[in-house]
Structure formats: structure tokens, C-alpha cells
Amino acid sequence: MNSDWIFNSIDKLIPFEVCLYHQAVPLSMEGSRIYIGMVNPDDTHALEYLRQLLSYLNCSLVPQTISAREHQALLSAYLSHTTQSPSAEDEIATEEEVVSVNRLSEVPELHLKARYLASPIKVLAQLPPPQIVQELLARVLMGGIGRLYFARQAPSGRILWSQDGVPQSVLDNLPLEIFQSIINELKRFAELPLLPVHHQKEVEIERIYDKHHVLLKLRVMRGDYGEESTLQVLRGAALRFYQQQKLVDLSQEALVAAQNLQKKLGEIRSAYERHPNLLHKKLEILSALEQVLEQVEAEVATLRNQS
């Protein structure tokens, strides 16, 4: 097993909450096939949901049987991977960093009005959707890696709250109109259109909450019976690790883009050598390219000075 691929796929392909709820985990991808480990590969509902979730990849899903212990071990390893410190300095600072006064002015603060934190989770079902969202956000922001999974079933909706991979509580049997209203409130919070999604949308929301830097990752996707959603909260070492991985990914994408640019410039040069009469057009292109390359060089110099 390629653990790096598995961990990255849990982040990007199948949200952790879905892996937890449907007892599944991505194992590998070969060509147009993606192999999914499942505790119960005969669970047709889970299979159909996973096919819907991964349909944009145009790949066939191949279920493989794994034991419940193997499934739990993979998800535990994923959590350990996402919460480990990216450097020796972070290993020393295991507690969350308190954001400085200067940083408070750079990132918007998140203000919540939760009045029922001490009440049983079932009390939330009696509240209006805007207040339900406030209460859920307050719970998921309590500490560690908090997650919410909004699952839509045929007759009703379900909300699963987990903390550091451990299920905390479930808000079950929500009327579908209430469930959809809650998802719409999440869309408003993330400034997403309220129209139903046809393809998965993901947005990252950076905030200061209780003087700590947090990142909320919201995904809205199309399920078997309508819209579903996941919300993940990252902070402290987990947030720094995530940001470092994202920087690595962006750097790789930039390198590939630069290599493609070099290749295209070579193709343009070869074309002009074969057709010298197009030289005047070449001069027009060169002027624009030189401006772009100057800006790229300035960005590279800035990054070099910051590293």
C-alpha cells in the first residue's frame, strides 16, 4: 500500500467522514480503476454513494474486502499523519499557538452565538436552521480536528459530529426541508451560491476563533437523494502540516506550468523558423511574453528572499 497516496486521497477524493460513515477507504488507483477497501463490499448504498462521489474522475470503482480492524488502523494512521508536526519546532510546541495581535487584523474573526452547548444534541433539532449552524460550529470548533458530516437519506437528513476521528454524537431524522435549510446556511457562511450543486464544490474559510487561527474546509456535493456536505476544522500543528502540503502541491504545479511554458516556447520558435514570413507576429508575442517572464522572475526573487 502507498500510504502517502491513501492519506492524500482521503483529503482530496473521499472525505474522512465518508470513510468513517461507510466503512470504506481508498487504497490505490491504476489507470481508469480506483480500488476502494470496504468492510462490507456488499453494501449497495455505500457503493452507489461512492460511485456518485467519484463520478467526475471517469473511473470504475473496484471494491476490495478489508477487515474492520484494518479499516480502523488506516483511518487512525491518517489522523496521526495529519496531526504530526511538520518540523522539529512544531514537536516542541504541541499546544495551539495563540495568534498575535498583529495577525488578528489580517484574518477576520469568527463570532458565534451558541446558547445550548451544555444541552443534549437532540435539542438542536428544535431550533431554527441558522441557530443550528451556530451551535454545530461551536461544537466542532472546541478543539482538535473537528468534523461534521451532513448525510441525506431518502426520508430524512442526518448530521454526524466527530472530534479527532471519534464520533461524538448524531443528529438524526431531520426533516428534509430543515436539512436543506442547514446546508443553505452553510453555503451562505461560505459565500457559495444557493442553487443546488451538480459537481462537488469546496471552499476554505480562514478565521480567527477564540484568538486561535483556524481553517474550515467546506465541501458540498451531490448525493443519491440531493445535496450533502462535510465540514472540517484544522488548527495548530494539523493546520501547519496541511498548509505545508498545500505549498508543496502548488510548487509542483508551478514547476509543471513552467515546463509546459518552456515546451510551448520551443514549439513557437520551431514554427517561426519554418515560416520566417510570420516574424512580425513573433515580435508582438515576444513583448507580452517578456512582461510575463519579468513578473515571474520578480515573484521567484521574492520567494527566494523569504525562504
Image (tube, grey):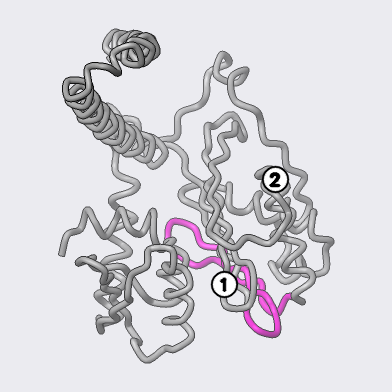
Q: Quadrant of residue 25?
A: bottom left
Dot 1 lies on which element?
strand
**Viewport quadrant of the N terminus:** bottom left
Q: Quadrant of residue 216?
A: top right
- Residue at 64%, 72% in the rendered image: 226
Q: Amino acid at mark 1?
A: Gly
Closer to us: mark 2 or mark 1? 1
Q: Secondary structure of the magenta portion, mostly?
A: strand
- Residue at 52%, 39% in the rendered image: 215
Query: Quick check: is 156 in the magenta stretch?
Result: yes
Q: Is 256 or 103 nearer to us in this picture?
A: 256
Distance between the alpha carbons at the discs numbered 2 and 1: 21 Å
What's the magenta region?
Answer: 153-174
Examine the rendered structure and indicate whether residue 80 appears above or below residue 298.
below
- Count up the numbered dots: 2
Examine the rendered structure and indicate whether residue 115 appears above or below residue 149.
above
Residue beneath label 1, please?
223
Relative image position of residue 124 (x, y in whole percent):
76, 65
Relative image position of residue 295 (x, y in whole percent):
38, 11
Number of other residues with Cα within 10 Å of mark 1, as a class: few under 14, some 14 to 19, many 20 or more: many
Would you say 23 lies left or right of 152 here?
A: left
The disc, 2 or 1, on the residue closer to the chain's N-terminal end is 2
Q: Is 54 or 283 nearer to us in this picture?
A: 283
Q: Amino acid at mark 2?
A: Phe
Residue beneath label 2, please?
189
